[in-house]
Amino acid sequence: MRLDRKNPEADLRKYYQVFLQGSLVVVLLVFFAATKIDFRGEKENLDLTTEQEVVKMEEIVQTKHIEKPPPPPRPPVPVEVPNDEIVEDQVLDINAELQLDSKLEMPAPPSESTEEEEDFFVVVEQMPELKGGLASIQKCVNYPKTAQRAGIEGRVIVQFIVNENGTVDDPQIVRGIGAGADEEAIRCVKNAEFVPGQQRGNPVRVQFSVPVIYNLTSKL
């Protein structure tokens, strides 16, 4: 059997308003009841009305370092000048005759330079030539034992004058390494022979320099 119509008593939509109002009333009652119940413990029931300790903060005043200007210098003490001194008048002889015939004293002439001029050339048309080349000097060198034991090696520069005959004058060390190597280099340079330098076809004295090399590996 099929029911085409619904039972009007079974229609719950008529009771929506009643249920809604009733639920609101229940919720309000529960809310009011919850506000009346004290859930705090004994420890939490503190009296907040008691006065709290007041902490006073002292204001910090920033000090300023004021630089005082130095005091002004004291004025000089005036010195009394005696008025009893007599100043003698200087007499000028305006009628004095001028002696024009007298000789005037002249200043002494400047002293002549005593420096001797260099008697050698630095650059000439034909520079001196070392006979046998630098190898002739290197063969002459005996490596000093002191320099070998100390492990000293390097280059010694010897400067000297090649005279008109091709021999060496006044050898000097320009750069040395010490330990006896400088003296040995001068000894070998003194024994060297050169073809003299020439200027305008004439042999002249020329300043010259040669290196003397000390190498430990070549002596091993």
Image: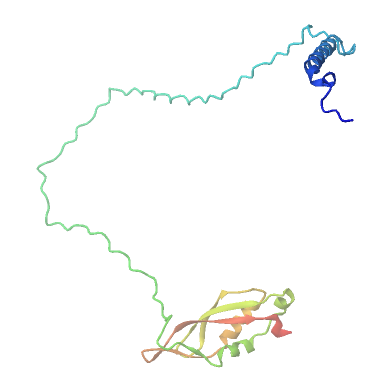
Image coords of residue 20 (percent x, y):
79, 17
Would you say 102 lies left or right of 207 here? left
Q: Quadrant of residue 147?
A: bottom right
The foreground one among 155 and 30 is: 30
Residue drawn 79% across the image and 9% down it:
48
Q: Which colour scheme is used?
A: rainbow
User: Residue 160, image x and y in percent?
Assistant: 51, 81
Q: Is residue 135 above or below residue 66?
A: below
Quarter of the image with the C terminus is bottom right
Q: Quadrant of residue 65?
A: top right
Query: Which is nearer the eye, 49 or 180?
Result: 49
Q: Extreme front residue here? A: 1
Q: Relative to 8, is 79 on the left or the right?
A: left
Q: Is residue 97 above or below residue 41?
A: below
Nearest to the observer: residue 67 or residue 160: 67
Q: Residue at x 30, y 64 (%)?
A: 110
Left or right: 220 as drawn, with respect to 97: right
Query: Number of marks in the image?
Result: 0
At 42% across and 89% down in the image, what residue appears?
Answer: 126
